[in-house]
Every structure is written in C-alpha cells, then in structure tokens.
Image (spheres, grey):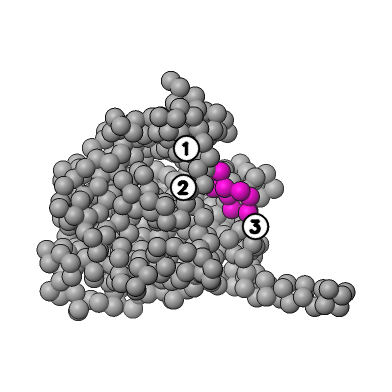
Amino acid sequence: MNFKTSVCTAAVAMALAGHAWAAVSADEAAKLKTTLTPMGAERAGNKDGSIPPWEGGFTKVPASYKSGDIRPDFFAGEKPVLSINAKNMDQYADKLTEGVKGLMKKYPSYRIDVYPTHRSAAAPQWVYDNTFKNATKAKLTGDGFSLEGAYGGVPFPIPKDGKEALWNHKMAWNQGESSSRGSRCFVVTAEGKVVLASDGVQEDQKPYYYKDGNAESYKGYFNLVRYVQTAPSSKAGESILAHEASDGQPRGIWQYLVGQRRVRRAPAVAYDTPDSVTSGMGFFDEAFMLFGPWDHHEYKIVGKKEVYVPYNNNRADAASPDELVKPQFLNPDLVRWELHRVWEIEANLASGKRHVVPKRKYYLDEDSWQILLTDGWDAQGQLWRTGYTLTLLAPDVPALVGNVSWGLYSLQGGGYFINSATNGLNKQFTVYPRRPDSFFSPDELANLGAR
C-alpha cells in the first residue's frame, strides 16, 4: 500500500468513526439541563397525562428502614387503571410488546394489571454530573463494542445508535458501588411444576461507579460479579466469577466446579450457551437482560414509544415464592405494570456469526436506561422467548434496581423461570462498603471451594 492510499484509507476510517460514534455537541448536551432529564429522558409527560413529568424520581427512605430490610411497596394503596388480557389486547396492541401479546395468546388467563405511572428512577447528583460530562466525551471504539471517555454515569444520555443505547444499559446506575444479595432461581416446567433450580449468594462491585474515582484511575473493568451456589445439594459450592470490561480488554470469566475442585477459565459462559443456573432454560447472554459479549448481532434504534412494562415491583419482590411463582406464569395479582416511554432496539445476526436467537428486540426504560423487556425469534422467524425484569424501587441507594428478579418465558415449549430473586429470604438486595480487589479474584474463588 502506498503512502497516498494509506492516508486516504485512514481519513475515510476516521470520518466514518466520527460520524457513527462521536460524542454530542455542547449545545446538544445542554438539553440535559432543560428539556431532558439528567439521564437523557424526556422531562415532560405525555399528551394525555398518563405518563407524568419527571420530577427527580423517588428518593424518600422510610424512617424505620434498615439496610437489607425488605423494602415496602411504596404505592400499595393504588388500584389498577386497566387490565389487559387476550380478550381486549387488540385495543392496546400498539403499547404491548410482541412477547406480551404472545403470552396472552398462549395463556387465555394471563393478564397484566396496569397501575398509575410513577417515574421513580433516581440517582445521586454526582452520577448526574458525570453523565453530563460523558455526553460530550464518551465515544465507542472497536466496532462499537468498546467504550472510552466515560466514567461514573450513563455514557450516552443522547444516543445516536443501538450500540450506544445498549452501552447505557450495561453501564446503568442500578445498585451503587458494591452490593450483595441472596439469589434464587425458580424454574417452572411446561407441565407447571415449580423447581428451585439454584440458590446462592451474588456479590457485585462497580469500579466504574467508585465515587472517589475518575476516568484516569478507572482500569476498564466496569463490573465484578461473584456467584456462589448453596443449593440444591448437587450443585452446592459451584461458583462463577466475572470481570466485565468496557475498554476492549479480555473479559475475565471463571468457574469453580466441585467435582474438579479447581477454578477454570470458562469462555463458554457467553452468548447462546445454556445457562446452568437456570437449568439451561435461559442462555448466558440473556442473564441480567444482557450479559457478557454481545458482538454476534448488529443493533439499530427502531425508535422511542410508549409501552406497558413491569415497573416498581416491590410487592412482587417481597412476596413468598408460593404466592408469586405459579404454573404457566407469575401471579398477575402481584406483578405491577405501568406505561413508560422506552427505547426499542432491534438486534439482528451479524454477518459471519451464529446464534440460536438470530433476532431480538430490547426495550429500555428512558429514565434508568435498563432493559425491562426482551423478545427473541428463532431461525425460522417464529417468536420464541420473552424476557422481563421486575424492577425494585430502592430509594435508599437511590436507584431503580433492574438486575434482580429477572427471567424469561418460552413461548414455544412452555415453561419459564425467575432468577436473581430474593423471594422467601429475610434479607433483600443490600448495598455494602467497597470490597478489596482480592475479594473478586480467582484465588479467592478457589479458597471458597476449599472451605
């Protein structure tokens, strides 16, 4: 290649990169302090008032609350404003996802009860301040699957493409610096049998959200996750450790298997590998709505729309397993749905890649940037699976916690699961002081197995 060709190629590449993934201008970012919320949502409500304006979220902590307590249903006195099922779903079809409509068609007794909308998502002021800085500094690299120039807030509050929007989900403020919780997975078979597939403790730490950190001190690993299984007895002691990177560094993923009595790297804990924690009903990249590498698809923003989504589900999250987990579907009496504006992102299989779910749709809450619902299609174009998360309102953080009580329905084979649930436990998702790095090391995982 001669010098002129090299210069031309480099210039085109830079132009394309700048066009696709450049940060927004200062003038556009200024909207985050006027017509948009600090996270980039529309500050105003909708025309008919069914979605109210955002007024700072819900941050009032009950005086009697102690860390780890079961959080109350802050809207317990409210009644549904409407109920939607197979008989009247056509009337509301424009505000229902394909997956929710699929559940109504499959199960005539399935319904969603829609309550008044509360735009409860909130974050500390320092997270809003960092988000404002990120708007003009953050950019994508590595074909859009790496991130630089962002720290301590949503990287792209005014996204221009699907990858930027999904990075917002991966980097969302949803649990503080460091947290711990019991994590249970209930699997319901197509025949309606409820099985406790796994039980354990999950620990999370977010170096990207260290309050005393900055972009210069951040080492590129935005999420550290450790899950140690305690039940059933056949799986007790099995563990998974993940170091999720945002800057293109190799992902760290390890497993401890009791039978082998050693920690091994586990590159297969990714993509469409069946998730052992859910007894194989879910895939690893469906965990927490989007987990691990995600470069087997291309992504585009379809648009923003008003959709009925699960929201403010403290009542469901506090229920006993017997109350919540029913044959065929979660108890509709306990699951709260609200009308919210969401970003609709479509994922299609990338050229040269393979995945058993070649097409997906993600629905991201405009206020918190968390994925609330997903739909997935099989290779024949048939709707196959629909995922959900029962967001927990935690004003003590403050946050709308979306990576608890998530799960998935199989629309073709039947059956479903709910994972990362604390139902039946006497302690809920709890924020903890930051742990040392060694807490999330493979050596510590091995030590746990040896005890």
Alpha carbons under labels 2 and 3: distance apart: 25 Å
Q: Splitting the image into 4 quarters, where does residue 449 fall?
A: top left
Q: Which residue is mark 1?
A: 255
Residue 360 is situated, as x and y percent measured from the top left of the image, at 40, 67
Residue 341 is situated, as x and y percent measured from the top left of the image, at 37, 69
Q: Which residue is mark 2?
A: 269
Nearer to us: label 2 or label 3: 2
- Cβ–Cβ under 8 Å for marks 2 and 3: no
Q: Which residue is mark 3?
A: 148
State which tag comes first along the sequence, 2 or 3.
3
| Residue name at image x 23 percent, y 69 percent | 102
| Residue name at image x 40 percent, y 63 percent | 356
At label 2, the amino acid type is Val
- Cβ–Cβ under 8 Å for marks 2 and 1: yes
**Mark 1 element type:** strand
| Residue name at image x 40 percent, y 60 percent | 371
**Mark 2 element type:** loop
Q: Which residues are magenta?
A: 242-252
